Each structure stands twice: as C-alpha cells, then as structure tokens.
Image (cartoon, rainbow, N blue to C red):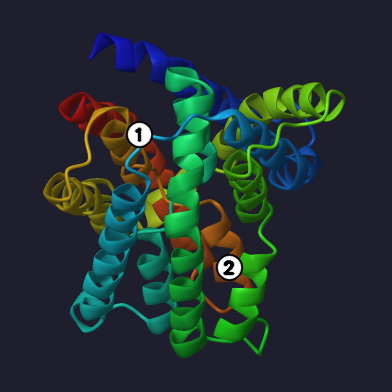
C-alpha cells in the first residue's frame, strides 16, 4: 500500500498545485485551454506511440483485459440509463449524470501507470483506452442527442464515430501497437523526439486537471454528484473486478485495469455537456467530486488488486 501511495502522491499533488494556480490566478486563465489542447494533440499521443512501440505485451492478457473493461463500462452505462426516472432531475442534468458514471480521465491513468510501471504501464493504458474510449464516447453522444436540451445537430452518433476515429490518443494507440505488432522500430531521430514530447505530457495534463476543478459547482450539485461518484468509483471498479477475475486476468494487467476503472470522470465531459445541451455546472461538480474521491478510492482499489 505504501508503494502505491508513494507513486500516487506526486500525481495528486500536481493536481492540487494546478487547482491552486487557477484558484489564486498565478497565471492568466487563458493558459489552460491551449495547454490542454497541445497535451491532447501532441504530448500524450507522443508518449503513447513511443511506449506502445517498445512495450512487451506478450503476456499481458490483452483480450481479457479489454473485454472486461468494455463490458463493465457498458453495464454501468445501462444501470445509469435505468436510473433516469428515479433521479427526479431534468433531462439535461441526466445527460451529465450519465456521462459522469463511466467516462474516464485518461490523463490521470496514463500518468499513474507511467510512474508505477514505465512504458509497460502506458502500453496497458493504451489497451484500456482502445477498449473503453470509443464505446464511452458513442454512448455519451447518443444519450446527449436523445435527452440534451439544444444539441442543434452539433453532434450525432455518426459524427461521434468520426470524432472517435480522429481522436489523437486512439490514433496514437493504433500506430504504436501496429508498429509493435509488425516488429518495426522508431527511426533514430523520431524516437528521442517522441520521448521529449512525451515527458511534457504528465505535468501539463495533471496541472490542467487541477485547474479544471470547480468547488462552487460541487457545492451546488452535491447530491447528484455524490451518486455519480459512488457509481464511477465503486460500482464500475467492482464490476470490472468481477468480470476480470472470472476471465483470469492477474498480475500487473489486473492492477492496471483497476487503476483505469477507478479513474475520475473525464474532463472532456464538461465540453460535451456545453456543446449538446447538458448541464454544464452539474458536470463540473461531478468531475470535481470524482477527482477528490479518487484520491481515496484509487489507491484502495489498486492495493486490493495488487
């Protein structure tokens, strides 16, 4: 347990530093959007490609790991959908609740996995991303189209599929694993370039996660945010554990799965809520609640798994 906490502490401290920088306006607020954009399009794809190309995943239970995460995510989404009428909230608020129960913050997952296991950890996160992120995006957009207030054709499931296909992290995973499977190495100049860019991903992304936390939004929407947090950080990891255990996943892949399953809600859910008629303030509160909650639940799940 102490080793896990030691590995997670720098990650959570960076998130807190990011929150403090935003809270006390130590830098201009205009910094954060470009920082997130360059991390999304350049830094993290570079890290994923370099790690996936070099990763030795021969014994990593790739298919059972991917199936377990995919299945648990789908089941939780159906549970959230079944809860709609019982929640007694508006449809726009429900779309935010729905997203918050299963969409993962991959930035934190990659950062923790890299700290704990290096490139093999990033490779395992890449498997998880391929298994969950396309499904999560398509489910979220489909519900937003059905229940969002004013999507105005901004996105449809078809356009969501195209957006997933253009996702830089998905593309990075495919490139890295494709080259790995074909036994291709990175060119001498490209490999150190990707390494340099990849090193920038972790601090910038984690600071941005902290900057995105909104305590006022959490206070205003505490009840629904707590329910979302319970599903995202307890129910989803528990289902993942049961399915993965039944499929015989063990060792580092199993711990990595529990890390991914216990991640806080995705910060990009807030953007989607604003675009498609969801409840933006509620979504911000849920992201904040799950980020704070994950400080406790993530090391606990990983300790139990490991």
Residue 272, numbered label: 2
| Residue 217 visible to an observer of this rendering | no
Mark 1, residue position: 59
N-terminal-most mark, 2 or 1? 1
Say which of 13 and 44 sits in front. Answer: 44
Q: What x and y, as percent, mark residue 276?
A: 59, 78
Query: For numbered disc 2, what is the local secondary structure?
Result: helix
- Residue located at (39% from left, 60% from top): 100
Q: What x and y, as percent, mark residue 185?
A: 71, 32
Q: Classify residue 76 by image quadrant.
A: bottom left
- Residue located at (70% from left, 64% from top): 166
| Residue 169 visible to an observer of this rendering | yes
- Residue located at (17% from left, 48% from top): 238
Query: Which quarter of the rendering shows the C terminus?
Result: top left
Report the mark closest to the observer, 2 or 1: 1
Q: Is residue 300 left or right of residue 29?
A: left
Q: Is residue 229 left or right of residue 113?
A: left
Q: What x and y, as percent, mark residue 194?
A: 76, 29
- Residue located at (26% from left, 36% from top): 254
Mark 2–mark 1 distance (CA, rounded to whole Å): 37 Å
Figure check: 36 above or below 21: below
Figure check: 147 above or below 108: below
Query: Which quarter of the rendering shows the N terminus?
Result: top left
Say which of 115 and 246 sits in front. Answer: 246
């Amino acid at each position: 347990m102490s080793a896990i906490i030691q590995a997670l502490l720098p990650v959570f401290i960076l998130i807190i530093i990011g929150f403090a920088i935003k809270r006390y306006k130590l830098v201009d607020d205009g910094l954060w959007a470009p920082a997130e954009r360059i991390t999304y399009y350049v830094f993290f794809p570079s890290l994923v490609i370099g790690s996936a190309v070099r990763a030795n995943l021969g014994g990593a239970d790739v298919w059972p790991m991917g199936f377990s995460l995919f299945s648990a995510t789908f089941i939780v989404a159906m549970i959230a959908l079944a809860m709609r009428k019982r929640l007694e909230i508006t449809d726009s608020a429900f779309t935010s609740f729905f997203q918050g129960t299963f969409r993962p913050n991959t930035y934190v997952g990659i950062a923790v996995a890299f700290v704990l296991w290096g490139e093999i950890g990033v490779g395992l996160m890449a498997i998880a991303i391929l298994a969950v992120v396309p499904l999560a995006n398509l489910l979220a957009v489909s519900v937003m189209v059905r229940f969002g207030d004013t999507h105005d054709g901004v996105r449809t499931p078809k356009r969501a599929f195209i957006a997933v296909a253009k996702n830089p992290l998905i593309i990075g995973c495919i490139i890295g694993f494709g080259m790995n499977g074909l036994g291709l190495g990175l060119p001498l100049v490209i490999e150190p370039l990707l390494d340099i860019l990849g090193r920038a991903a972790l601090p910038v992304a984690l600071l941005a996660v902290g900057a995105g936390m909104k305590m006022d939004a959490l206070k205003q929407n505490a009840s629904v945010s707590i329910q979302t947090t319970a599903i995202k950080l307890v129910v989803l990891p528990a289902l993942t554990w049961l399915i993965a255990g039944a499929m015989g996943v063990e060792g580092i892949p199993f711990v990595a799965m529990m890390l991914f399953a216990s991640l806080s809600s995705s910060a990009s859910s807030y953007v989607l809520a604003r675009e498609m008629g969801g409840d933006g303030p509620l979504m911000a509160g849920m992201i904040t609640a799950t980020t704070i909650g994950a400080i406790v639940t993530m090391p606990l799940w990983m300790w139990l798994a490991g």
